[in-house]
Amino acid sequence: GGRSRITEEAESATAAYFGFDECLFLPSGYQGNLACVATLTQAGQAVFVDRRVHASIARALPAGKADVRAYAHADYGRLERRLTSAAPAAIQPLVITESLFSMDGTVLDVARMAELRRKHGFFLMVDEAHAVGALGPGGRGLCADVPGTADAALGTFGKSLGLFGSFLLLPKGFSAFFEYLSSPIMHSTAMPPAHAAAVLKLLERLPGLEGRRARLRDNAAFFRARLAERGIPTRGTAHIVAVPVGGEARTACLGERLCERGVLALAARYPTVPHGDGLLRFGLTALHTRPQLLRAVDALAEAWACPA
């Protein structure tokens, strides 16, 4: 199926809502990152990327044959040193990061990144997949707190928005460039008109969901505070709550014990995370009740003695 008029309408409405010039819909966030990163990068271009970006970004980087320079996770000082030491080039440098990191819940320092962008003049691409709908004014994502920070961004309809597919938010003129040169877009089927109709309804509802976003923030703060009272560490500050564990065996053991107690948490271990950096990942929602969260805290506290 080719593109439909209602899809173009929904793409324009999405771009306007999120404060960008243009937008393209794709079947998934993975495909969206592949399309964006592979198309933006050029041979010989300096590309600076956070070491903990999503696998879809990491897989796309070799396709552009750029000079990829990873920096330590959320280490803005290290990023600036690398930007400063880079030789002057004819091609604008590219920085790629997530806003809410999908595995450990780290939140991007948007103000610091915006300052670095102004100082060093790089093109900034931000994966907002886990922030859209849940964070930022009107659910517009974290970068909306400092308008104009990101040059391009990826969002998804398949997480907090409850639909499917993803969207690329782009500067003026970029969508035609992507449609002409991006293989993940050129060689894929267009999204169905029904999807576009659902997106238009979603955009009508998003501004009115501040109550749910507030409950989500409250639930995350409550859950972290109760875990801290039991001596259990956490990472991040948003609705992705990561509990660092360490070894792969203990991480798997804790995940199994939680499951036995009726609590679902992702027991993330290598290769999803680096060796020895296993963690339990809890995904909170606005619909979780305090008794449910306390039950999860109790279950984890009971299981915490799991052998290493």
Image (cartoon, rainbow, N blue to C red):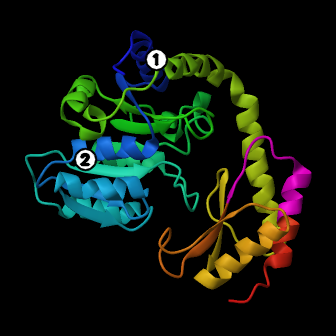
User: How many residues crowd mark 2 within 10 Å: few (<14), some (14–19), many (20+)?
Assistant: many
Q: Secondary structure at mark 2?
A: helix
In this rendering, is residue 87 above or below 116? below
Kindly report the distance in space between the C-alpha atoms of the residues bearing marks 1 and 2. 25 Å
Residue 29, picture quadrant:
top left
Q: Split into 4 quadrants, where in the image is the C terminus?
A: bottom right
Q: Residue at x 39, y 53 (%)?
A: 56
Tell me the residue that label 1 is attached to: 10
Relative to 93, 144 lies left or right: right
Q: Position of residue 161 (x, y in %)?
A: 61, 33
The three-letter code of the residue at mark 2 reads Ala
The answer to whether residue 267 of the structure is visible from this angle is yes
In this rendering, is residue 4 above or below 86? above
Q: Secondary structure at mark 1?
A: helix
The three-letter code of the residue at mark 1 reads Ala
Q: Earlier in the sequence, mark 1 or mark 2?
A: 1
Relative to 77, 288 lies left or right: right
Residue range (magenta): 282-296
Q: Are marks 1 and 2 in contact (CB under 8 Å)?
A: no
The answer to whether residue 150 of the structure is visible from this angle is no
Q: Position of residue 142 (x, y in %)?
A: 52, 40
Residue 121, picture quadrant:
top left
User: How many residues crowd mark 1 within 10 Å: few (<14), some (14–19), many (20+)?
Assistant: many
Numbered circle sitting on residue 38: 2
The verdict on residue 200 being magenta is: no
